[in-house]
Image (cartoon, rainbow, N blue to C red):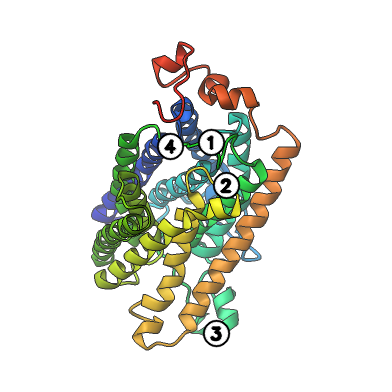
Amino acid sequence: MEWDTGAAAWMLMSASLVLLMTPGLAFFYGGMVRAKSVLNMMMMSFGAMGIIGVIYVLWGWSMSYGPTVGGFFANPFDQFGLSGTLTDADGNAVVSTLGNYPQVIDVAFQVTFAIITTALISGAIADRVKFSGWMTFVPLWVTLSYFPMAHMVWGGGFLSGSEDGLAAKVFGVVDGAAAVAPIDFAGGTVVHINAGVAGLVLALIVGKRKGFGKEPMRPHSLPFVMLGAALLWFGWFGFNAGSAFGANEDAGLAWVNTTSATAAAILGWLVVEKIRDGHATSLGAASGIVAGLVAITPAAGALSPVTSIILGVVAGALCALAVGLKYRFGYDDSLDVVGVHLVGGLVGTVGIGFLAGEGGLFFGDGAKLLVVQVLIALVAIIVSAVMTGIIGLAIKKTIGWRVSEEAEVGGIDLAEHGEAAYETIGSGRVITEGKA
């Protein structure tokens, strides 16, 4: 058959861009930790790539997009090992349900989302956990939280616009679908609320770093942070514009909205910093980039460039304020996963209910879409919290999360990996905070 080679090329490029985001995240997070922890932090991202790249082929795709089991997850055995996903019984390539290209390209695209979502969580527990604990958590969490959430939202499950979904139960059905369908263009619930809640739960289960709130724990390499933010922004065009599933008008709108919101979020964050702290910092600019990208993710196809700017400014400002909550409430979210991804994900998901060109409250379409968006956000919070709590506590009671106090103080890189990022650490002189 004649494939749409333009759409196929765009989706393969988008998948590659999203895959690049995880090494970009490794730089972003790696720069934010202390010098003695940078390799461990980066290894957590690469470890997620290794594990999820394997299990997605085995049962991840099937559990996300196979036949539903009660609307909450798909049958993990139906397409185990991608059986029946790539070719049909006659040996012909299976066509994607989203465009005129082979379905294997959808597998490529979706595995990158599973990888980056799980890697995001690692920032909440930086500087203090065993690598073995993290590598045990990754396959369990992606199986019990990410794959079910992807199915519920994008696979026709409970949080989709299907006639059996939550939105249909609240506002009824029209022509076999929810009368008011929820909107999550590229992962506000599946990715950011899911990962942000998981980060909060794990931070509470694992506990605080030694010295948290009592001694400075500054980023050891702000250039790493800026490089990571740049790679994330670049990769995010695959994340958002790729979610149009074709090189088309929707992809163009998502690209422009992503840029507009992100640029506005930088400004929103820096204004808050300047008023609150007297300085507009490079760390704030980099964090504002991520906050804007997070917020526009679910909304990239539903807003205009102008309303995207509004969403970005709000997200940047609120996330800048939210990162300080950990000091007020006493939880140690090391790299602000909660403040940026949970809060940014909520701003984007709920903000759609206000700002969407079709269905938005501010455009005279009433509050029905807003109600639906709030409900799907709440369900995402509950599912992620419960699943993460079960997994996190199970690991704590068995192999344990924490490295020894000696390893945490002396350097988790040396203790867990037998190597150091910088020669001065490997030779025995640990670079102390503020002297790196």
Tag 4 residue:
218
Q: Which mark, residue 171? A: 3
Residue type beneath disc 4: Arg
Residue type beneath disc 1: Ile
Contact between marks 2 and 1 (CB within 8 A): the answer is yes
Q: CA distance from mark 2 to mark 4?
A: 30 Å
| Image position of 301 with respect to 147: above or below | below
Contact between marks 4 and 3 (CB within 8 A): the answer is no
Q: SS class of the residue under badge 2?
A: helix
Residue type beneath disc 2: Val
Tag 1 residue:
51
| Image position of 149 with respect to 376: above or below | above
**Lower position in the chain sequence, tag 2 or tag 4:** 2
The location of residue 25, given as percent across then percent down, is 40, 41
The location of residue 73, given as percent across then percent down, is 61, 58
Between 234 and 276, the one lying in front of the other is 276
The C terminus: image quadrant: top left
One can see residue 239 in this view: yes
Q: Residue at x 49, y 38 (%)?
A: 53
